[in-house]
Image (cartoon, helix red, strand yellow):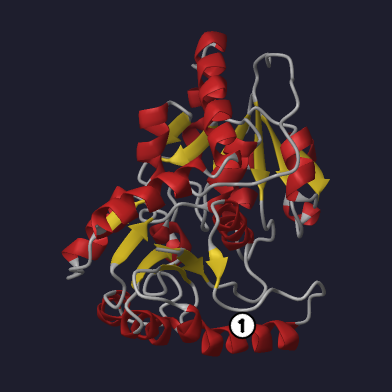
């Protein structure tokens, strides 16, 4: 039996990390190597050529691991693997039927059913798949691994008030909640990393420390914060809108980034990853950001130290590809 996979054009950070982990596990690419230079048309043609080549590279008994973001070719590759006597394990990166609405839930389940085994983000997503008619065996990833050439810097224990870090797109169109926070920031400060922060939209500028955009490796090595915030949408009172609703089912890659930085998280209590947070004691879960000041004031240095140690331990596992390796090993056991 050979474990195989297919490289995709211009992958996201999460997908690129999974590719590297699979390569380290001895997976064989059934397509073609990516060119050393990045060009959208060239990348597309290389992927398309790899899809055509893939069926001829699969042998009886092989397992093809597909990321569920190759939607254009997904059903074709599943059918080709089965015709060649292989099995298909699918790692779900995103479900289009949620906030993007590219496909209905029924059609998405039908498409995913061409796989022999699915790896969902978490137990909530697994339950949604099963409740909506998925008959394929479903396993759970837990959290997306996060590779980085850098390691978190050793920093002295923080003194209250704590500093909260947020990394991502900072414009009001995508994260309007950021601009409703200043009236509720009393004892803590915000470190903001990313592009698009509108200084003119905030009155009390001393409450924000805007760092601008930095690479993920730089952030891992030098994150200026004590907690990482995982939040989405327009409101400070809940994670609203399609992206906020999706947080009830998915694993935000931002969560993995904060763990890799060695930072405990602050996350919406209804998010799917709130379960992971409670089980691993890697942060705090809150119902609304207007209660953040009070919640932070109650955390003792001892409690913070334990959360930080737990976050660092998870971050170390993420750097080793632990969660994908575990989930894929469970998939192979089920396929036997």
Residue 262 coordinates in the image, percent (x, y): 62, 30
Does any portion of residue 141 appear in the rendered image?
no
Residue 334 coordinates in the image, percent (x, y): 25, 55
**Residue nearest the observer in this picture, 184 or 36:** 36
Which quadrant of the figure contains the N terminus?
bottom left
Give the secondary structure at mark 1: helix
Q: Is residue 237 above or below residue 130?
A: above
Q: Is residue 158 above or below residue 15?
A: above
Residue 15 coordinates in the image, percent (x, y): 57, 62
How many numbered callouts? 1
**Residue nearest the observer in this picture, 212 or 21:** 21
Residue at x-position 34% and y-position 69% = 61
Q: Is residue 75 above or below residue 172?
A: below
Residue 49: image quadrant is bottom right
Residue 65: image quadrant is bottom left
User: What crowding class fits label 1: few (fewer than 14 Cα within 10 Å), some (14-19), or many (20 or more)?
Assistant: many
């Amino acid at each position: 039996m050979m474990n195989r996979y297919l490289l995709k054009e211009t992958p996201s950070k999460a997908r690129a990390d999974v590719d590297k982990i699979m390569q380290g596990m001895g997976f064989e690419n059934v397509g073609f190597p990516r060119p050393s230079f990045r060009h959208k048309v060239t990348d597309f043609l290389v992927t398309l050529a790899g899809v055509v080549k893939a069926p001829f590279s699969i042998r009886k008994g092989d397992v093809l691991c597909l990321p569920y973001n190759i939607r254009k070719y997904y059903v074709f590759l599943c059918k080709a693997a089965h015709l060649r006597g292989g099995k298909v394990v699918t790692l779900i990166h995103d479900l289009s039927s949620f906030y993007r609405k590219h496909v209905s839930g029924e059609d998405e389940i039908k498409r995913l059913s061409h796989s022999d085994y699915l790896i969902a983000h978490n137990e909530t997503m697994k339950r949604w798949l099963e409740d909506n008619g998925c008959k394929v065996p479903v396993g759970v990833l837990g959290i997306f691994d996060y590779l980085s050439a850098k390691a978190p810097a050793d920093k002295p224990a923080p003194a209250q008030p704590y500093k909260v870090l947020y990394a991502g797109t900072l414009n009001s169109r995508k994260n309007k909640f950021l601009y409703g926070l200043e009236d509720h920031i009393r004892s803590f400060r915000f470190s903001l990393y990313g592009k698009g922060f509108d200084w003119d939209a905030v009155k009390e500028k001393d409450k924000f420390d805007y760092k601008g955009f930095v690479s993920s490796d730089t952030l891992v090595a030098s994150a200026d914060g004590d907690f990482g915030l995982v939040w989405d949408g327009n409101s400070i009172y809940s994670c609203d809108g399609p992206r906020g609703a999706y947080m009830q089912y998915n694993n935000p890659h931002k969560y993995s980034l904060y763990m890799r930085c060695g930072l405990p998280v602050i996350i919406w209590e209804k998010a799917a990853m709130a379960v992971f947070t409670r089980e691993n004691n890697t942060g705090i879960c809150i119902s609304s950001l207007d209660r953040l000041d009070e919640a932070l004031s109650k955390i003792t240095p001892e409690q913070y130290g334990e959360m930080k140690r737990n976050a660092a331990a998870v971050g170390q596992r993420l750097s080793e590809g632990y969660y994908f390796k575990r989930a894929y090993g469970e998939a192979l056991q089920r396929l036997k």
